[in-house]
């Protein structure tokens, strides 16, 4: 019974409203965590005290959210990552510890992720990678803020065949750079920081982007010139799968967050 309760607690997801954020500003007494699974992994854009890799349970990463500012335009929206509910899923990323007195981080993220990106703010249980835990600790779950896009937002693109998604990504660019750069940098982050992890959706999409770019004789290096996302104006290495670190992609339908 106790194990069942612990498992249920892994999937805790709670919306964090703008009213709650405003009430917390200036009164927060403890540092807090922010979990990123997209561009935050390599470009957080805010000051933080510490960063660690880890994962959240109960979600899978999907490139189902549109973007019309940083990685696309209104006429050609790019595709960026969001999370969809998946009871067997594990999504890896990076969490950042922010000082309690830092009153700029959450408003900045609210502009970047919510106002411009179409995401909503939630709190969730974050699990640090075991190598970051003390030797005598088996679990050290932390409450963390994260940003998830829901189907009701105006930028939502939803599922599509991976080849179609890859071709769309090759055509898109926004104020922060190309959509291709977003995909390749996220894949590189996963290989460099969490080589044991498996994210079939991400790596399959990356392989197709590289293949179509080669077929079209597009120089990928010319697309890898990232600009800062701070302004509110707007050969692939093999991945070694591991059961412990694998992001399980079951042959079943996934459920979008709808709150």
Image (cartoon, rainbow, N blue to C red):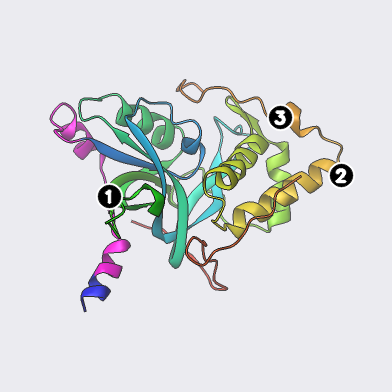
Q: Which residue is mark 2?
A: 215
Magenta stretch encompasses residue 110: no
The reply to whether discs 2 and 1 touch (Cβ–Cβ < 8 Å) is no
Q: Position of residue 211 (x, y in %)?
A: 80, 48
Q: Quadrant of the C terminus?
A: bottom left
Mark 1 neighbour class, 10 Å CA radius: few under 14, some 14 to 19, many 20 or more: some
The stretch in magenta equals: 6-30
Numbered label attached to residue 142: 1
For image coordinates 73% across by 54% down, the residue present is 163
In this rendering, the answer to whether 179 lies above or below 122 is above
For the point 65% across and 40% down, which residue is it? Answer: 184
Left or right: residue 212 versus residue 74 is right
Alpha-carbon neighbours of circle 3 within 10 Å: few (<14), some, or many (≥20)? Answer: some
Q: Disc 1 vs disc 3: which is toward the camera?
A: 1
Secondary structure found at label 2: helix
**Residue in the image at 19% along x and 29% along y:** 25
Dot 3: element: helix
3D distance between C-alphas at marks 2 and 1: 45 Å
């Amino acid at each position: 019974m106790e194990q069942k309760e612990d498992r249920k607690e892994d999937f805790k997801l709670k919306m964090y409203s703008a009213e709650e954020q405003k009430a917390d500003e200036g009164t927060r007494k403890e540092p807090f965590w922010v979990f990123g699974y997209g561009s935050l992994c390599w470009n957080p854009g805010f000051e933080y005290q510490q960063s660690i890799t880890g994962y959240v349970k109960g979600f899978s990463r999907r490139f189902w959210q549109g973007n019309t500012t940083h990685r696309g335009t209104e006429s050609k929206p790019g595709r960026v990552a969001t999370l969809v509910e998946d009871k067997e899923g594990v999504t890896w990323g990076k969490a950042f510890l922010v000082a309690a007195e830092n009153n700029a981080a959450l408003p900045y993220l609210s502009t970047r992720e919510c106002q411009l990106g179409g995401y909503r703010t939630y709190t969730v249980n974050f699990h640090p990678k075991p190598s970051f835990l003390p030797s005598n600790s088996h679990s050290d779950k932390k409450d963390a803020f994260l940003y998830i896009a829901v189907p009701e937002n105006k930028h939502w693109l939803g599922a599509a065949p991976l080849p179609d998604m890859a071709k769309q990504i090759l055509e898109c660019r926004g104020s922060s750079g190309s959509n291709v750069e977003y995909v390749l940098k996220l894949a590189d982050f996963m290989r460099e920081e969490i080589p044991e992890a498996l994210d079939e959706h991400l790596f399959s999409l990356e392989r197709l982007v590289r293949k179509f770019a080669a077929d079209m004789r597009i120089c990928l290096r010319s697309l890898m010139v990232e600009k800062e996302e701070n302004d509110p104006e707007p050969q692939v290495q093999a991945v070694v799968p591991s059961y412990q670190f694998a992001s399980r992609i079951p042959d079943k339908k996934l459920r979008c967050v709808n709150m």
